[in-house]
Image: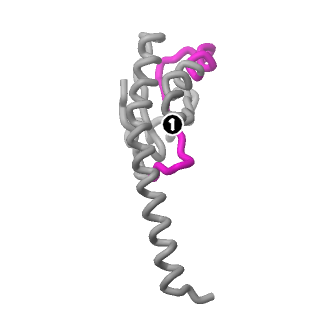
Amino acid sequence: MRVTASQRRHWQERLALEREAGSLRLARALPAARRCAAALQRRWPQIQGVWLFGSAVEGRFGMDSDIDLAVEGLPNLDLLEAMAEVEAAAAEDDIPVDLVRLESLPPHWQRRIRDRGRLLQ
C-alpha cells in the first residue's frame, strides 16, 4: 500500500494534535496528582510516601492516560477509602486515578517506582 504525501501530512498533523492534547492533559494531571498526595497525607499522616509513576513521568501521557499513584504506609484495609479520596481530589480535572499500595507490588516494581517515579509526598 502506498501512502500519498497528502495522507502522510494528514497523519503527521493528527499526531501533532494528539501530542499537544496529551501535553495539555498532563499539565492538568500533575497538579491533580499533587492534590491527591496531599489529601492522602492529611487523612493518613503515617504515610511514608506517594509516588507518581507510569505514563505521566515517562513521557507518554496521552488523552487516554490516567494518573498512576503508589502509596507507601497506607493500611491495607484503608485502600478503598483512599481510592475515594484521590478520586474526589482529582474529580475537577476529570482524569481517572489508579492508586496502589507500594507494599502490595512485587519487589522489582517497588524499586522501579522508587527509582523512576516522582515522589510527591
**Residue 111 painted magenta:** no
Q: Which residues are magenta?
A: 60-83
Judging depth in this view, the residue of 62 and 16 nearest the camera is 16
Image height of 102 relative to 59, above or below: above
Q: Nearer the viewer, residue 38 or 75?
A: 38
Task: Quadrant for the N terminus, please.
Answer: bottom right
Color scheme of the displayed model: one colour
Asked if residue 46 lies left or right of residue 84, the reply is left
Q: Position of residue 105 (x, y in %)?
A: 56, 33
Rendered position, 54 above or below 96: below
Q: Residues within 10 Å of mark 1 (few under 14, many from 20)?
A: some
| Picture coordinates of residue 98, whole percent (x, y) | 56, 33
Quadrant (top left, top right, bottom left, bottom right) of the C terminus: top left
Residue drawn at x 56%, y 35% as measured from the top left? 96
Q: Residue at x 52, y 49 (%)?
A: 63
Count every numbered label the image shows and give the total.
Answer: 1
Query: Residue at left 42%, top 38%?
Result: 28
What's under tag 1, amino acid-wise? Asp
Q: Is residue 80 magenta?
A: yes
Q: Nearer the viewer, residue 110 or 53?
A: 53
Q: Which residue is mark 1?
A: 68
Where does residue 9 sit, x and y in percent of width and height?
46, 77
Vertical order, 40 against 19 (above or below): above
Image coordinates for residue 44, horizontal then vertical, percent:
47, 11
Q: Tell me the element at label 1.
A: strand
Tell me: 100 left or right of 32: right
Of residues 65 and 117, the one drawn nearer to the viewer in this rendering = 65
Residue at image coords 45%, 52%: 21
